[in-house]
């Protein structure tokens, strides 16, 4: 039997300050997420963030929490079930969250000892040390504690995978036809500039010019920002959106250190000044709707956009557990495993 571990970042167990505090404490104390000196990180997290942010974040989570719970968890579970149904009895598919529940430890406990080989698929289209890197580090740390483990292979980032792109384009196409926007945003999760530079093997390419991410090269192949640009351009091509009619931007920045630009909350009022009042937003760094898409963009972003004179801001729903996305995940897994086990089914 083959095993498949799907990984997403995580979510609080409840939309309450206490649950959010526990989640943020685990998340923000990860040295791959807040990659600064340990003493500075401890002061930032425990003295500045945790006393205030959990209450505000809990209020935001309450706006998007559904009857079944966190949208990220609900959608990820539904996707897991859909992938399991497609792969069939020869596979055991489990979901693990890097932070929170279901934990990676619990998911691996249901796989190791039951499967002959294990495929690990981080559900992050574009790779970054704070998401893909942290998740894989934790997986192998957990496996190292076990007396035995099956052969493990990790899927590559799927930022340019045709199945992923086709599924996202399929979500957006009817919305674009209905809304007829003046402009389209491809809004990705932001990261500190220092993390981009750490991923630059040359030490001289990243953020050194305005077009450093214009195309994927051997130097920036592992760069998160370059992969975001590639995803946006490939989606725009599929949807027939001209370069002048879309903007690539980055949301969710935290703290005062420089984060990759342009910032989504800065771009939106600038669009209004340019006379663009109907905007459609794709968030293709997220394969499941979550706080960052539903609250930050669809609710708060929409309110802020209207407040400065915008007419409408429409979020394209994420892939969630759509059949086309479940099909694409199965395709990713089978193609990857076939490189190692040609007869795999």
Image (spheres, rainbow, N blue to C red):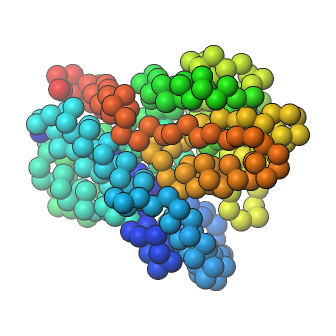
Out of 282 and 103, give the one closest to the viewer.
282
Residue at 47% x, 80% y is: 18
Residue at 56% x, 49% y is: 293
Q: Is residue 128 above or below residue 325?
A: below
Does the rendering let one see residue 140? no
Out of 116 and 253, give the one closest to the viewer.
253
Image quarter of residue 11: bottom left
Q: Is residue 148 left or right of residue 124?
A: left
Q: Position of residue 12 (x, y in %)?
A: 43, 67
Residue at 48% x, 47% y is: 289
Position of the N terminus, as image quadrant, is top left
Residue farthest to the right, as pictured: 273
Out of 137 and 326, give the one closest to the viewer.
326
Q: Is residue 268 left or right of residue 327?
A: right
Count how many numbered circles sit on residues in the image: 0
Q: Is residue 192 left or right of residue 50?
A: right
């Amino acid at each position: 039997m083959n095993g498949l571990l799907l990984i997403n970042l995580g979510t609080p167990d409840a939309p309450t300050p206490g649950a959010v505090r526990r989640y943020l404490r685990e998340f923000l104390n990860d040295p791959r997420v807040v990659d600064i000196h340990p003493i500075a990180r401890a002061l930032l997290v425990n003295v500045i963030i945790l006393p205030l942010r959990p209450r505000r974040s809990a209020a935001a989570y309450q706006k998007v929490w559904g009857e079944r719970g966190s949208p990220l968890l609900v959608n990820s579970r539904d996707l897991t079930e859909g992938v399991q149904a497609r792969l069939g009895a020869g596979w055991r598919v489990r979901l693990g969250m890097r932070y929170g529940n279901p934990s990676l430890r619990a998911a691996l406990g249901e796989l190791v000892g039951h499967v002959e080989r294990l495929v690990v698929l981080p559900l992050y289209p574009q790779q970054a040390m704070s998401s893909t890197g942290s998740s894989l580090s934790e997986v192998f740390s957990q496996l190292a504690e076990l007396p035995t483990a099956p052969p493990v292979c990790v899927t590559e980032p799927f930022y340019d995978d045709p199945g992923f792109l086709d599924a996202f384009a399929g979500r957006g196409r009817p919305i674009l036809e209905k809304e007829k926007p003046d402009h389209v945003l491809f809004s990705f999760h932001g990261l500190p500039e220092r993390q981009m530079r750490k991923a630059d093997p040359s030490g001289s390419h990243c953020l050194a010019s305005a077009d450093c991410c214009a195309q994927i090269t051997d130097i920036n192949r592992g760069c998160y920002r370059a992969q975001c640009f590639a995803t946006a351009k490939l989606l725009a091509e599929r949807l027939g959106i001209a370069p002048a009619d879309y903007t690539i931007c980055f949301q969710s920045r935290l703290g005062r250190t420089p984060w990759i630009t342009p910032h989504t909350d800065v771009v939106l009022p600038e669009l209004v000044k340019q006379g663009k009042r109907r905007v459609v937003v794709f968030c293709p760094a997220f394969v499941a709707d979550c706080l960052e898409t539903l609250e930050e963009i669809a609710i708060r972003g929409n309110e802020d956009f209207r407040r400065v004179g915008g007419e409408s801001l429409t979020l394209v729903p994420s892939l969630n557990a759509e059949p086309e996305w479940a099909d694409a995940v199965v395709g990713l897994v089978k193609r990857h495993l076939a490189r190692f086990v040609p007869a795999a089914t």
